[in-house]
Amino acid sequence: MGKIPAFLFTFATLSLLVPETAWSQRRVSTRSPLDTVGKNPSQEVGWEVLKTFRSLGWDGGYRWRIQLKIMPRRERTRYVNGLMYGDRTDRGPISRIDIVESPLDVNAQGELADGQTLRLLLQSGQGAYALRARTGQAGPPVLVDSIEALEPIAGSDISLFDLLAPYVYWPKFKYEGRTTFRGSPTHLFWMYPPDEDEALKSRVSGVRLYINDQFKYLAQTEIFDETGEKAKTLYILGVEKVDGQPIFKELDVRNDKTRNKTRLKIVDASMGLALPASVFTAQSLTADLHTQSIPTGRQESFESVE
């Protein structure tokens, strides 16, 4: 079985892969005698699970055409399209994303009106950061701070915080133990916001991770507000294989306070790519992805012969 990434998006992080066999299992949870939640589980065991999870990733880079299905409870559903390139550096997953906030259109005078695209460069892992620019924006890209990262993207329920998933790498955590979640053994972690980020701590008290023990994927993420109330839940819906690698088909992000929901769907994907480093630079944010000439090749891979 190939390597499994630690998170989605970053967007993916929000980057979530899981083999198809995981979803063929029964989703009814039955408690196992091996479950340790509520039994003072070993933090050393938890650290080994988390350390392994952080080290996993895809084979090569990727290109995804994505769509956000924005589903407010009391308003009409609408769709937002985007394009995403991703890879992994020594610091962790990196991604370059375009979200089309308003497409090209024709105004009342019959003239072509410019569209607007949100351009993002997201470096996850240790020392995570996000750079943001927009079509027609003057000046250099903007470095996004902790509070801005929590704001919704394009009127959806997805934020840069969800895409970066910095909580996977927060140094302070509590291993809550092993449980049976959706019929599969799963490790629970409570992740604490960094002490030095007072702004973030004023909005987020913690994040709970559900890490599948067998296939090492992030089955669910729960984000809690400053009062300890659950504010948001992220979970995947189905998988498929592309270029020999399993990727999630859809990711749901649910606002647990408003009950609004946004579904991220991968419309088209190419995996195992060799991408130029220039894609993942601040300079790439000066133009929309579809206007740039981005050469893509296949990453060479070799299997050992015993």
Image (cartoon, rainbow, N blue to C red):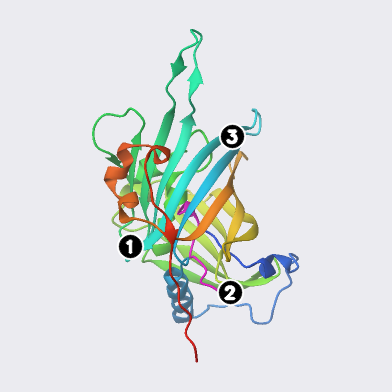
In this rendering, the count of numbered labels is 3
Question: Which of 224/9 is in front?
Answer: 9
Which residue range is magenta in the image?
1-13
Q: Where's residue 13, x and y in %?
A: 47, 55
Do labels 3 and 1 touch, CB within 8 Å?
no
Do labels 3 and 2 touch, CB within 8 Å?
no
Which of the marked residues, 3 or 1, is nearer the chain's N terminus? Answer: 3
Residue 126: mark: 1
Q: Where's residue 147, x and y in %?
A: 36, 42
Q: Is residue 146 above or below residue 50?
A: above
Report helix, strand or loop for mark 3: strand
| Quadrant of res 137 | top left
Residue neighbourhood size for the residue with mark 2, other residues' Cα within 10 Å, grouped as few (<14), some (14–19), many (≥20): some
Q: Is residue 155 above or below residue 106?
A: below
Residue drawn at (32%, 41%), measured in percent from left and top?
285
Residue drawn at (58%, 66%), measured in percent from left and top?
244
